[in-house]
Image (spheres, rainbow, N blue to C red):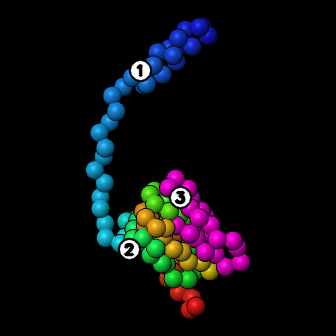
Amino acid sequence: MRRAVALAAALFLSACATAPRAEALAVLQREPGVHLVLEGGIEAAPGYHLVMGEVVMGPDGVIPRHFHSGEEFLYVMGGSATVIREGEPDLVLQAGQSVRIAPGVVHGGKAGPEGIRGVSSWVVKDGEPLRTVVPD
């Protein structure tokens, strides 16, 4: 039985390795900014809702200091960015990396020399703004 499973696994891996490469997928191109793509209530967390956005910034673009009433989750799909969080060391994120920013943490950011494309998700208390800007 083990031999049959090992043989099946080897055949599957061999087929995957020799399969033709998929053509590149067309990707939606957006202007720089934060583009909201989804917003809705969270049944498991009454009193909160989820907001998702695509983050597109050109080289060295800056996100001003601000905070959120709930968590923020950022995933970098392309380029890079430095996340600047009050009281914590700066964090440089490359494509494929992510960060969670706790509620109330004042933070901002700067796109890398090639810009950034990423996805952010925010858990927002109902009745609160998505973000509150903090003056420098």
**Type of amino acid under label 2:** Gly
Residue 69, can we see it? no
Which numbered mark, 3 or 2, is in the foreground of this view? 3
Looking at the image, which residue is at 67% across and 79% down?
A: 86
Give the labeled residue for mark 1.
15
In the displayed structure image, the side of residue 56 where residue 13 appears, left or right: right
Which type of secondary structure does the marked residue at label 3 adopt? strand
* Nearer-the-camera pick, 43 or 37: 37
Residue 88 drawn at (x, y percent): 70, 73
At label 1, the amino acid type is: Ala
- Return the mark for residue 31: none
In three-dimensional space, the C-alpha distance between marks 1 and 2, rounded to whole angstroms, equals 42 Å
The spot of residue 121 in percent (x, y) is: 50, 65
Residue 33, label in figure = 2
Q: Which residues are magenta?
A: 81-104
Query: Where, by quadrant of the figure, is residue 6 drawn?
Result: top right
Q: Earlier in the sequence, mark 1 or mark 2?
A: 1
Distance Cα–Cα, label 3 vs label 2 = 19 Å
Decide if residue 65 is in sight here.
Answer: yes
Say whether marks 1 and 2 touch (CB < 8 Å): no
Q: Residue 5 magenta-drawn? A: no
- What's the CA distance linking mark 1 and mark 3? 32 Å
Q: Residue at x 31, y 54 (%)?
A: 27
Residue at 56% over, 77% down: 108
Disc 3 marks which amino acid? Gln
Which residue of the protein is positioned furthest toward the right in this rendering?
Answer: 87
Question: Badge 3 is on which residue?
Answer: 94
Crowd tier of the residue under label 1, counting other residues whose Cα lies within 10 Å: few below 14, some 14–19, many 20 or above: few
Give the SS element for disc 1. Answer: helix
